[in-house]
Amino acid sequence: MSGTILPREELQELGARLRQEGKTIVLANGCFDLLHIGHVRYLQEAKRQGDVLVVALNSDRAVRTLKGPGRPVLEAAARCELIAALACVDFVTVFDDLSADRVLRELCPHVQCKGTDYSEFTVPERRVMESLGGIVRITGDPKCHSTREILAEIRQRYGK
């Protein structure tokens, strides 16, 4: 089973329907620039935090702004398809903002998961989640490489 790729404009309706069904909604958001095992473990653990996992991906423009030139490695359409193919993912959407604040307000998840590159004090959207009555959880395997480290290793081994 794979996730559904959903236009961001449909998040509010999805959130309302899932809450009416009594489902616990989990949002995981990020660039997912180059899918690796750290991402998979992060999303698997995020799914265990509730009933429905929605993954919000930064748009290509947002990734370039956040990560710099040469990024993203994979365009948004490919990243969506890869993430949606994971069994733990129920829905995937793309957002153009630099933070997930608007996505959180539209979906109103019960839980927002962030990867282990964050601490409970560095999650940019923490205040928005708290204002919605939700919680933030740090999930994933802290021993896994980050995309930045993987790209640096590739450059070191094979040149630019």
Image (spheres, grey):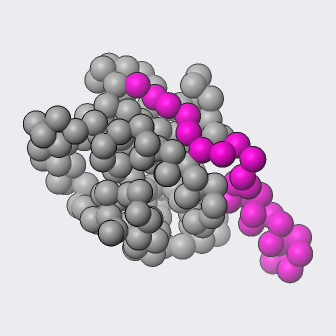
Report whether 15 appears left or right of 5: left
The image position of residue 65, as x and y in percent, is 54, 54
Residue 160 or residue 29, whichever sits in front: 29
Would residue 137 be counted in the magenta stretch? yes
Residue 38 or residue 122, whichever sits in front: 38
Q: Going 17% across and 53% down the picture, which residue do you hit?
A: 10
The image position of residue 102, as x and y in percent, is 31, 39
Report whether 120 appears left or right of 131: right
Q: Quadrant of residue 40?
A: bottom right
| Span shown in magenta | 135-160
Count of marks, rendered view: 0
Q: Going 77% across and 58% down the picture, which residue do you hit?
A: 149
- The answer to whether any part of residue 30 appears in the image is no
Q: Going 12% across and 40% down the picture, which residue do you hit?
A: 21
| Quadrant of the rendering where the N terminus is positioned | bottom left
Residue 54 or residue 104, whichever sits in front: 54
